[in-house]
Amino acid sequence: MNPMNLAYPIGKFEAPAHVDANLRSTFVAQIAEAPSALRRVVERLSESQLDTPYREGGWTVRQVVHHLPDSHLNAYVRFKLALTEETPTIRPYEQAAWAQMPEARSGPVALSLDLLDALHRRWVACMQALPAESFARTLYHPEQGTMSLDRLLALYAWHGRHHIAHVAALAAREGWS
């Protein structure tokens, strides 16, 4: 299989030129669905399967599971900062270093599955209560520049599907159904 397909099973993120109410609703629904979709792809995996990298040089399934709430918690905080401050400068974090932390390398995935579920319920409740114009608010990312909340929403809707696809593709390749 093409190594690029293993790294980007649903393709690289492409920001939409314009996000309308229907597309925004789709992205919010993808955020809402991500925890249960992740739970479905990992619920029957053994400990050794959880410790299998999804591709050569990639994180293990366990690290991917722990990465999603780490990343999405940062996204949620960034989202809230943009809603409550004028174009806040957000702080990047070293996601690769976070994935090497002891609990990310060996901790029970149930902890992160539960965290992701609660986090996404809260995030979705926040987004569903916002007027459309709130999604035009912006933040400044030192590495990526100024981003609207619509772009951030699109990015993290993609991000969840991207990592869930890593695990699902590995399970399919290995016959772990």
Image: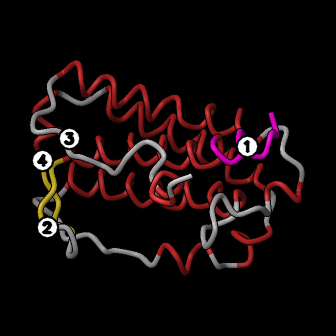
In magenta stretch: residue 168: no
**Magenta stretch prevailing secondary structure:** helix
Q: Which of marks 3 and 4 is in front?
A: 3
Which secondary structure lies at badge 3?
A: helix
What residue would you read off at disc 1? 171
* Residue found at the very far top of the displayed protein: 22
The range drawn in magenta is 169-177
Which secondary structure lies at badge 2?
A: strand
Label number found at residue 137: 4
Along the polypeptide, which appears first: circle 2 or circle 4?
A: 4
Give the residue drawn at x 83%, y 54%: 49
Q: How crowded is mark 4: few (under 14 residues within 10 Å), some or many (20 or more)?
A: some
Along the polypeptide, which appears first: circle 4 or circle 1?
A: 4
What residue would you read off at disc 2? 145
Q: Which of marks 4 and 1 is in front?
A: 1
Quote the CA–CA distance across marks 2 and 1: 36 Å
